[in-house]
Amino acid sequence: MSYLRNPSFENSTSNWKKINHASNVTFNAGPSGNPAPVSGNNIANILSLVNGGSVGQDVTVNATSVSAFAYVTSVTGGVDGALAIWNLSKGVASTSRFTIQNAFTWQLVVNTLDLDGTANADVRVEIYVSTAGAQLSVDTVNLF
């Protein structure tokens, strides 16, 4: 069971939002033939004009810890980014950094965060693009 809504972007960018450097981020979702989606018909594309632009989704969970995963790729390769999980209730985060080595090849990124006893924690899954001007493609993002 995933806590996230619209985890594979089948409803475009519904339930997702631009967060860090929002005015410098282009974020859209739709059908893709290359790369083919991991699941469903759509993928999301994130382009940040500055290092650290991001998109994410906030949810409330009642768990002792959470784990997240996402499939990421790019049309060029050589793109750096990160998958972060935030416990917004406590202001702490866990971050898994990645580098896309091969264009059009999906990579699985995983992360886990102990919620430190926070009941009904406000949690954010956030995907950062660390290579300014590079497009990152994302599919099948889950939090459980």
Image: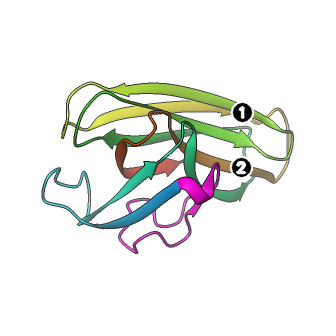
- Whether residue 21 appears in magenta in the rendering, the answer is yes
* Nearest to the observer: residue 31 or residue 76: 76
Main secondary structure found in the magenta portion: loop
- Relative to 114, residue 61 above or below: below
Q: What is the number of callouts on the image?
A: 2
Residue 123 percent coordinates (x, y): 71, 49
Q: Which mark is residue 123?
A: 2
* Callout 2 amino acid: Val
Residue at 42 percent across and 52 percent down: it is 46
Residue 143 percent coordinates (x, y): 55, 48
User: Does residue 144 appear in this view?
Assistant: no
Instruction: Give SS at disc 2.
Output: strand
- Relative to 100, residue 9 above or below: below
User: Does residue 102 appear in this view?
Assistant: yes
Residue at 18 percent across and 40 percent down: it is 104
Of callouts 2 and 1, the N-terminal one? 1
Q: Which mark is residue 93?
A: 1
- Whether residue 134 appears in magenta in the rendering, the answer is no
* Nearest to the observer: residue 88 or residue 134: 134
- Relative to 128, residue 43 above or below: below
Residue at 35 percent across and 70 percent down: it is 10
Q: Quadrant of residue 58?
A: bottom right
Q: Is residue 135 left or right of residue 117?
A: left
* Nearest to the observer: residue 57 or residue 46: 46
- Relative to 126, residue 31 above or below: below
Magenta segment range?
Answer: 1-24
* Callout 1 amino acid: Ala
- Badge 1: few (under 14), some or many (20 or more) residues near its Cα, within 10 Å? some
Q: Is residue 119 left or right of residue 28?
A: right
Residue at 38 percent across and 60 percent down: it is 8
Instruction: Give SS at disc 1.
Output: strand
